[in-house]
Structure formats: C-alpha cells, structure tokens
Image (cartoon, rainbow, N blue to C red):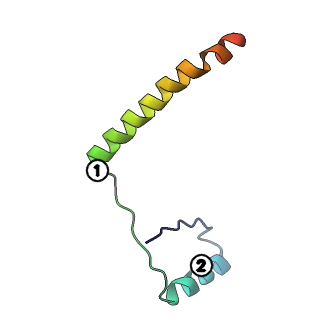
Amino acid sequence: MCTVTLEYNKNNALARRKLAALLATGLFYQVNSQEPTPEEVEAHRELRDAALEHSRKTMSHVIARYL
C-alpha cells in the first residue's frame, strides 16, 4: 500500500470537486493521521540530535572559514 499526501486550498471549489471525484472512484480512501507515539517521538529526537552532531563535525572547517 502506498501513501499520497495532498495539499490544497479548502476554499477552492474546483479542488474540492476533483478530490471528491477521486475519492468517489473507490480506488482511493482517506486515512486520518494519528499522533506519533512517545517511542516514535523519542526515536525522532535521537536521530535529529545525531544528525545535527554529525553535521557540526563535518561542516566545522567550512564554518570556521567564514568566522
């Protein structure tokens, strides 16, 4: 199963009609997003912190050039 995320202007009548027509085909359905679990939030924080730390180390010579 694949996921497609659409963004549209909810005040645009044409966009709403096209979306309704797409959903009416029965080939697609709407899924309500769920809040992430505390474990997912913590895993994301750890990954973000690791990426930032690595970025600081690898970019330090570039940053130092401009300071």
* Image point (48%, 31%), residue name: 51
In this figure, which residue is indicated by the disc labeled 2? 16
Three-letter residue code for mark 2: Arg
In the picture, measured across the screen, residue 8 lies left or right of residue 45, that is right
Q: Quadrant of the C terminus?
A: top right
Q: Where is residue 52 drawn, in percent x and y? A: 49, 28
Three-letter residue code for mark 1: Thr
Please tell me whether residue 16 is drawn above or below residue 40 in the rendered image: below
Q: Where is residue 48 drawn, in percent x and y? A: 44, 34
Give the quadrant of residue 30.
Answer: bottom left
Q: Where is residue 13 drawn, in percent x and y? A: 64, 79
In this figure, which residue is indicated by the disc labeled 1? 37
Regarding mark 2 in the picture, which secondary structure is present there?
A: helix
* Residue 65 - label: none
* Image point (52%, 90%), residue name: 25
Between residue 26 and residue 32, name the one nearer to us: 26
* Image point (44%, 79%), residue name: 29
